Image (cartoon, grey):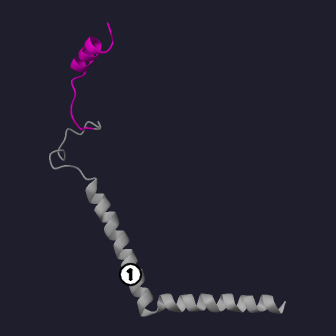
Amino acid sequence: MEQAQQEALIKQWLKRRLLRCWLSLGGLVASGIVIVLVLLGLSLMGTMGGESETASSGSGDGTITDTSVDGAAFHAAWLKYYSGV
């Protein structure tokens, strides 16, 4: 029983020490650096997948490439080259 109380006191002391460490100036600086690095990484990843300058003003028809396709010409080419008809 006494050993369980002693272990509980040690755990409580470690929690307080950890909290005191993170609330000190060094802990706040380390936390700030981590937050800034995460935000910079997210913004860098966001700029890597952006639109190219030429594709920014597309037709807006909802296709993946944002280009307009003549449906009749596509169908004729499909029949000619791929359907075997």
Q: Residues within 10 Å of mark 1 (few under 14, many from 20)?
A: few
Name the residue at the front extreme.
Answer: 3
Residue at image coords 32%, 9% = 84
Q: Nearer the viewer, residue 15 or 63?
A: 15
Residue at image coords 61%, 87% = 15
The image shows residue 39, relative to residue 59, as above or below, that is: below
The image shows residue 22, relative to residue 63, as above or below, that is: below
Q: Is residue 71 left or right of residue 27?
A: left
Q: Is residue 19 left or right of residue 38?
A: right
x and y, in percent, of residue 82 in the image: 31, 15
Q: Nearer the viewer, residue 30 or 66?
A: 30
Residue at image coords 19%, 41% = 58
x and y, in percent, of residue 63 in the image: 29, 36
| Quadrant of image for the C terminus | top left
Q: Nearer the viewer, residue 47 or 6?
A: 6
Name the residue at the top extreme.
Answer: 85
x and y, in percent, of residue 16 in the image: 59, 91
Asked if the magenta segment contains residue 68, the reply would be yes
Asked if the magenta segment contains residue 66, the reply would be yes
x and y, in percent, of residue 31 in the image: 42, 81
Name the residue at the left extreme.
Answer: 54
Label 1 belongs to which residue? 32
Residue at image coords 71%, 92% = 9
Q: How many marks?
A: 1
- The residue stretch that appears in magenta: 65-85
Q: Amino acid at mark 1?
A: Gly
| Quadrant of image for the N terminus | bottom right
Quarter of the image where one finds residue 66: top left
Q: Secondary structure at mark 1?
A: helix
